[in-house]
Image: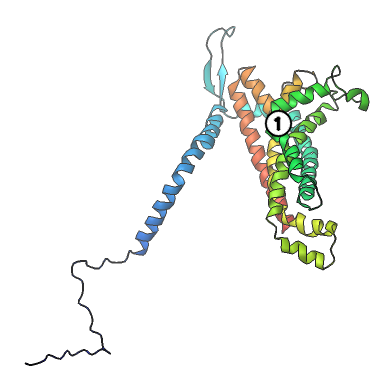
Amino acid sequence: MAVRVDAATDDQPRTPPPNTAFPAVPAPTAPSRNRSRRTAALTLLAPFLTLFTWVYVLPIGYALYESLFREERSGLGLEAGRTVFAGVDNYARVISDPAVLAGVGRVLFFGAVQVPVMLVLALVLALLFDSAALRLGRFFKLAVFLPYAIPGVIAAILWAFLYLPAFSPLRDTLRLDFLAPETVLWSTANIVTWSWTGYNMIIIYTALQAVPRELYEAARMDGASAWRINISIKIPMVRPALVLTGLFSLIGSLQLFNEPSVLRSITANVTSDYTPAMAAYQAAFSANDYHLAAAIAVLLALTTCLLSYLFFTLTARRSG
């Protein structure tokens, strides 16, 4: 019997035949890959873009649209009014209104004083909680953060009882009228500081927890004191958290509404247009001038955006 000898040896493995049942799929081209990536990105962003458009873009656009009109009434005003195009007349009314301008200056002055004081308190508390020397840390963290859990209106009501002459145990002790024209703004600042210091402290404290502990150990080995570690390591490392809390506090100052609205019920030194937000509320729900209220809201939003941009620019230059 003849024995067939293969041409291929063990050192030369034969090549398997091509698979004809599953033909090779060509690799996707660069344009098709880019289209697939764009489609995937848009699919992932669609829920966010939908909510962002519905919650933010549409209300701002509607307010901008309403601010361009005004309501006209004929005769004694008993007939239904008609809406006519006013252009920038509502914005001119807002800019020329001394009460609104006084409210803007008031909240800017409020933020320039209250925000730094609150952030310094929050930073000091965060540094104390981060140190190992503090006892009962969890209890004090909860005690400092607890005011933030109380709604702003309720907090203002609680402090209002401490400001009223008939109920306040502080008025006679400190010999200070908390509701006087020159002190009512700072009484409001006290409520805001009490409510929001714990919230800002939690943000700064969380940033401190992300700092590597090896930096502290190396500084101690080099002879650095706890004060030097705080100044040279901890505070520079939490600068982004300070910028974030500063921005949030600045926006909150421009939107000041709850606390002065509550104090307005117990003192005549807080007017209906004490802040820009209160002026918009007064125009919309007391004077029924929704178009003027929309103009105030739009200008307030633009002012907030401008000041936020300036704040970011200044902090970026200092950090650089």
Residue 316, placed above or below residue 247? below
Q: Residue at x 70, y 35 (%)?
A: 148
Q: Is 206 placed above or below 171 here?
A: below
Q: Residues within 10 Å of mark 1 (few under 14, many from 20)?
A: many
Image quadrant where one finds the N terminus: bottom left
Nearer to me, 140 or 197: 140
Q: Quadrant of residue 172?
A: top right
Query: Where in the figure is residue 158, as x and y percent of width and height?
Result: 76, 24
User: Label 1's element?
Assistant: loop
- Residue at image location 75% in from the left, 18% down from the top: 265
**Position of residue 104 measured from the top left corner of the image (x, y, whole percent):** 73, 32
The residue that label 1 is drawn on is 256
Would you say residue 274 is visible in this rendering?
A: no
- Quarter of the image where one finds residue 157: top right
The total of numbered circles placed on residues is 1
Q: Amino acid at mark 1?
A: Leu
From this viewpoint, which residue is outermost toward the bottom? 2
Q: Nearer the viewer, residue 177 or 165?
A: 165
Q: Nearer the viewer, residue 49 or 287?
A: 49
For residue 177, side relative to residue 53 (left or right): right
Q: Position of residue 18 (x, y in %)?
A: 21, 74
Q: Is residue 284 visible?
A: yes
Residue 91 occupies which quadrant of the picture?
A: top right
